[in-house]
Image: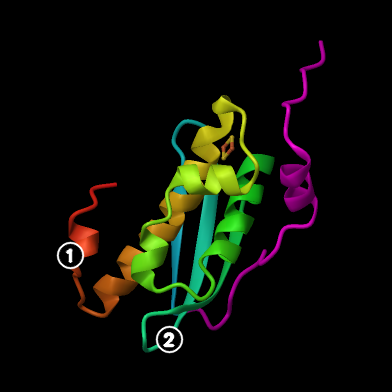
Amino acid sequence: MSRMPLPYNPKILELFKHPKNLGKMEDASVSAVAGNPSCGDMITFYLKINDRHVIEKASFESYGCAANIATSSIVTEMVKGLTLEEAWKISWKNVTEAVGGLPSVKFHCGILAVGALKRAIRKYLKQKGLSPSWVQSDLH
Ligand code: FES
């Protein structure tokens, strides 16, 4: 029995086939791994952050599905040039919109992408001994 393909929109398929910023970043300021227990997929997120706490570049490695690769790719584009605080405020809904929508069974794939970004930001702040209020007030 063949499974019905998921109704991905063309933007997701394009990002899946030609993801931007895919691969390990050798000069990253921080990297973080996040996993999704429900599907078992994993992703690593890399950020290069300058002294003014601005993200200069981002990249990712994903062992997830097409939706995860597409959303991770778009997150690396969205955060470029943002301060850590601005990047922190990106929600999985923003990301889902940016890829033109996801089937609801695939929402968690975008949540995983944003989770990895947040984990990387949190790890970087910890390394620097910083605990700004915008992180403390967000329990996600
Ligand atoms: Fe696991 Fe999409 S099914 S990340």
Residue 1: x percent and y percent?
Answer: 81, 10
Circle number at residue 50: 2
Q: Nearer the viewer, residue 125 or 134?
A: 134
Residue 25: x percent and y percent?
Answer: 58, 75
Q: CA distance from mark 1 to mark 2?
A: 20 Å
Residue stretch in magenta: 1-28
Query: Would you name the residue on which mark 1 appears?
Result: 133
One can see residue 65 in this view: no
One can see residue 91 in this view: yes
**Residue visible at 54% across and 83% down?**
27
Kind of element beneath mark 1: helix
* Rendered-image quarter of ligand 1: top right
- 10 Å neighbourhood of mark 1: few (<14), some, or many (≥20)? few
On screen, 13 above or below 80? above
Q: Is residue 139 magenta?
A: no
Kind of element beneath mark 2: loop
